[in-house]
Image: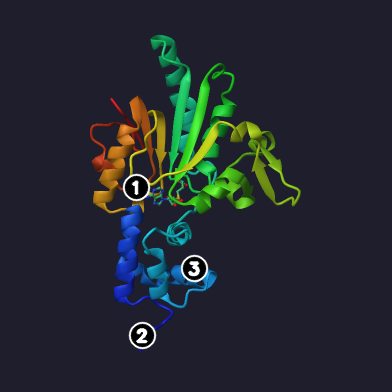
Amino acid sequence: MPDPEKLSPQQFRRFSEFIYRQSGIRVDASKITLVSNRIRRRLRAGSFPDFDAYYAHLTAPGGSPELEQFLDAVTTNETHFFRTPAHFDWFKGDFLTETILDQRKTGRPQELRVWSAACSTGEEAYSLSICLAENSLRLKNWKVSVLGTDISEAVLKEARLGVYRDRALDAVNPLQLKRYFDVQPDGTTWKVKPSVREPVDFRRHNLMEPLRLPPFDCIFIRNVLIYFDRESKQVVIKHLMNSLARGGYLVVGPSEGIYDMLDPLVKRATYLYQKP
Ligand SMILES: C[S@@+](CC[C@H](N)C(=O)[O-])C[C@H]1O[C@@H](n2cnc3c(N)ncnc32)[C@H](O)[C@@H]1O
């Protein structure tokens, strides 16, 4: 007797192929229970009778607004402020110093563009914005901007709100908390101040597609490609390289599994690659 609570191997294959087509993420068969549990929550939320009805709804011609919720349920959005602090230390130290010196030498426009690719609920993008705010004296007269993108509208909605609980703020020091956040009336959440929010823009984007915007001086791509197969990683890397300015840097998360795929970028540190 099949278990109605769990995807059958055939149903799992159909869902995992759909996830792959939509996002580039390969869900391994060992995750069948996890994926069943997560999809079951969506069945209840939308009153769908069973997995097959849900699949038919998701894949109906013309698309479904449920797609966002589905991708949100089956992907991992876990993140926090200043995750892997060494990356932010480099950004506000060596990177800003080099960028400012380079501008003085070459006379390039005083503009700095940073991209948090797969930003989830916004903590990475706002951490970068705080780094820029902490260096506002050095960056006086500069036009600075941070773009945060993600495939999930649900996380982007939270990112735009910019309200966080203490768990996300563990690595924010007391001075930063005071300067860059407003405690909310409930006393348990903090909202990023307008000065941190202002340079940041959020938009939906699938990493499997090119981002048709002017190039970025620095791109953070962290804790997302771990779930992609090699072929999809290659597609994403090609798009990221095209979006990187000459001399720009790619900051790579510790578990992306792409270190051997970054040619012709030049390795500057384990996590850091520069476009020649
Ligand atoms: C664990 S979070 C990483 C957040 C942040 N970069 C960090 O390092 O903490 C992974 C995010 O990748 C997003 N994601 C997964 N597949 C994606 C795709 N194909 N295009 C864009 N974002 C994707 C998920 O929605 C999720 O919010």
Quarter of the figure that contains the N terminus: bottom left
Quarter of the figure that contains the C terminus: top left
Q: Residue at x 27, y 39 (%)?
A: 238
Contact between labelled residues 1 and 2, with CB atoms less than 8 Å apart: no
Instruction: Give the mark count.
Output: 3
**Separation of disc 2 and disc 1 at Cα?**
36 Å
Contact between labelled residues 3 and 1, with CB atoms less than 8 Å apart: no
Counting residues from the N terminus, which is met first, the one under dot 2 or under dot 1? 2
Q: Which residue is mark 3?
A: 42
Comparing 63 with 10, the one in front is 63
Whole-percent x, y for residue 127 in the image: 54, 38
Contact between labelled residues 2 and 3, with CB atoms less than 8 Å apart: no
Q: Amino acid at mark 1?
A: Glu
Q: Residue at x 35, y 33 (%)?
A: 243
Q: Amino acid at mark 2?
A: Pro
Q: Which residue is mark 2?
A: 2
Q: For the residues carrying marks 3 and 2, which lies nearer the camera in this image?
A: 3
Counting residues from the N terminus, which is met first, the one under dot 1 or under dot 3? 3
Counting residues from the N terminus, which is met first, the one under dot 3 or under dot 2? 2
- Badge 3 marks a residue whose secondary structure is helix
Q: Which residue is mark 1?
A: 256
